[in-house]
Image (cartoon, helix red, strand yellow):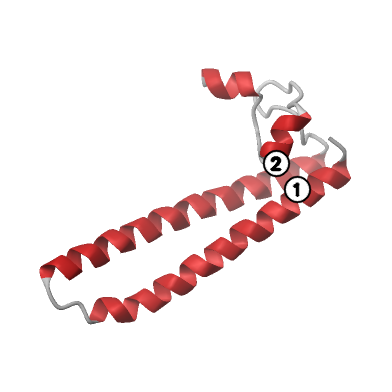
Amino acid sequence: MDDKRARELLRAERETVESLLHNAEAIRQGSWGAADEVRDSGDQAQALTAEGMDEALRDRLTSRLAAVERAERRLVNGTYGRSVRSGQPIPDDRLEADPTAELTVEEARSGQ
């Protein structure tokens, strides 16, 4: 994959993840006020469950943003498109599907 296409994919992925993180944070801030108005234990349980799900989503998005940053560094270093484990090329189709891919499909499947 050429560098220009890789940059486009990574930029789009970064924008998507940052937007989702921003929205998750806005929802979280809005939900604190609602949590203060909880009236019964069922409402409290629902609020805690929603808060835990929000936190899990933020964790996944933060992890995804870190993967984008690692891929951007590999692009700058000239190692983008190669497995971080073996150095083998990662097919363009895989990078199109997941521009942050760090392993070949075989390596990811086997957990090598």
Numbered tag placed on residue 88 in the rendering:
none
Query: Is residue 37 toward the left or the right of residue 57 in the image?
Result: left
Identify whether 63 is placed above or below 111. below
Residue 69 in picture, x, y percent from top left:
67, 50
Quadrant of res 81: top right
The image position of residue 106, as x and y in percent, is 61, 18
The amino acid type of the residue labelled 1 equals: Leu
Residue at the left extreme? Answer: 41
Label annotation for residue 99:
2
- The reply to whether discs 2 and 1 touch (Cβ–Cβ < 8 Å) is yes
Residue 46 is situated, as x and y percent measured from the top left of the image, at: 23, 64
State the residue at coordinates (60%, 57%).
17
In percent of the image, x 39 and y 58: which residue is there? 55
Q: Quadrant of residue 40?
A: bottom left
The residue at the point 55 percent across, 68 percent down is: 22
Q: Secondary structure at mark 1?
A: helix
Q: Amino acid at mark 2?
A: Pro
- Which mark, by number, is residue 9? 1
Is residue 112 at least partly visible in the picture? no
Q: Which comes sooner in the sequence, label 2 or label 1? A: 1
